[in-house]
Amino acid sequence: MSASQFTRDAHRALRNPQLRQALYASRGGFIAKRAAAAARLPEFEALRDNARDIKAHTLAHLDLYLESYEEKVIESGGIVHYARTADEANDIVVSICRRRGAKLVVKGKTMIGEEIGVNAALEANGVVPVETDLGEYCIQVRGEMPSHIIAPAVHLTPKQIAADFRRAHRDLPPTRDLSEGGALLAEARAVLRKKFLSADVGITGANFLVAETGTSIVVTNEGNGDLAATLPEVHVVLASIEKLVPTLEDAGTLLRVLSRSATGQDITVYTTFTTGPRRRGDPDGPEEYHVVLLDNGRAGLFGGEFAEVLRCIRCGACMNHCPVYQTIGGHAYGSVYSGPVGAALTPALVGIENTVDLPNASSFCGACESVCPVRIPLPKLLRHWRERARRIAPARQRFALAVWGFFAKRPAIYRLASRAAVWALARVGREAGHLRALPFAINWTASRDFPAPRSTTFQAQFKQMRRS
């Protein structure tokens, strides 16, 4: 994604009244519910510390936990596949489907599936993928990517979804009322239930992978993860390598902060544990169980200044509290990972040269770090990315920063130049009280006036105030 592309997408989002309506409707609910859930649990802050430490410990010893996890999956009758790149992961999934002669795949929500573009890979090989998370299904109908980690269709209004269903569902009577959320849900359920019953392969993501038992954990509020994992003959888990946790007890700690941070629930409606294929005597479950573990650039972060972003448990709290995300939505970020965590993670996955503007998509208010359940220092990571982005910024921007840096490193010259600049700007804007254009800030003054400064600098005024 180019810098100019991000700028264009952000401006387009600002001019979209339906997007503003949808984002405004969702904003208060997430924030208020998280705050209420945290207040109900006196040990919530201590749990955040524990969750941070669990993730940090696991990442520091990931090689050992990956070996342990693979061993347990094999013991339970499953198969673990390692994929270095998105293409390798897609090839593995396609080969599993091809070997089984699969024609239909049902998918639970998986951000890794979005990251690697598994739907397109399946379709190119004659396999029809169907999203079964309601939000994911809505955006699949529209041909869009998710705009939020836990609420993929948060950018849509019910009216838009109803129109999409009428267009895509050919058997839907034109007179049926879809004005209520319950009616939309019932319509989606009727369509998706047939898909569950006829699917050859089920694909799910994983919130956590437990090294102690070889277990995959998925949390949902709709039960689609259970159906995708148990009804088809083959279950494929798509997960990235940092989803490992050492024990079931550790997973329990992380689950307690995940749901409260994401949706304000004590726990999601469905928390599903799967460990291998169906055993003798089991009433249901798949015949085959596969886990595809994806690297896709993550291994290069270990031990570096961006390693802390791998603690993320995909709760979406940073997005819900970010003033930038809540203004432009997720699609402007140009990645399946949006908001503050996306701005910190995406440059690591695809290169800062392709995402040079993302670190600037932050007000640095610190709200993201204050609510992160695993205490990722997102502002610090974004500052690191900004430092790298400056090295490849356009020549004009580098020159402006170099000029500012020259004066900032020389206090006496800085004070002299500041006094001269303030005096000049005060005289130019004295009559109107503001400035319609400002050198080196043309983009800022293009949509707003700059108040004319007083004839003395802030430092001079402060010094005068202290004397008096």
Image: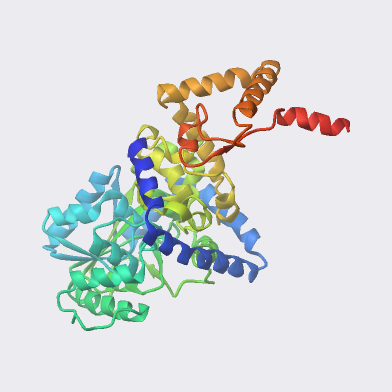
Q: Position of residue 456 (x, y in %)?
A: 72, 28
Q: Is residue 323 above or below residue 223?
A: above
In this rendered view, identify the residue nearer to me: 88 or 176.
176
Q: Position of residue 25 (x, y in %)?
A: 46, 66
Q: Quadrant of the N terminus?
A: top left
Is 344 left or right of 136, judged from the image as shown?
Answer: right
In this rendered view, identify the residue nearer to me: 466 or 383.
466
Q: Quadrant of the C terminus?
A: top right
Quadrant of residue 405 within the rendered picture: top right
Residue 278 in sight in this render: no
In this rendered view, identify the residue nearer to me: 128 or 458.
458
Is 139 left or right of 310, judged from the image as shown?
Answer: left
Q: Is residue 209 above or below residue 61?
A: below
Query: Total of numbered circles in the picture?
Result: 0
Q: Position of residue 351 (x, y in %)?
A: 37, 35
Q: In the image, what residue occupies the spot 19% across and 70% down?
A: 167
Q: Is residue 46 above or below residue 389?
A: below
Is 419 left or right of 79, judged from the image as shown?
Answer: right
Q: Residue furthest front?
A: 431
Q: In the image, what residue occupies the spot 33% across and 63% down?
A: 109
In this figure, which colouring scheme has been used for the structure?
Answer: rainbow
Q: In the image, what residue occupies the spot 53% across and 68% down?
A: 264
Residue 37 in sight in this render: yes
Is 166 left or right of 113, judged from the image as shown?
Answer: left
Q: Position of residue 105 (x, y in %)?
A: 20, 65
Quadrant of residue 146 within the rendered picture: bottom left
Quadrant of residue 210 within the rendered picture: bottom left
Q: Residue furthest right?
A: 468
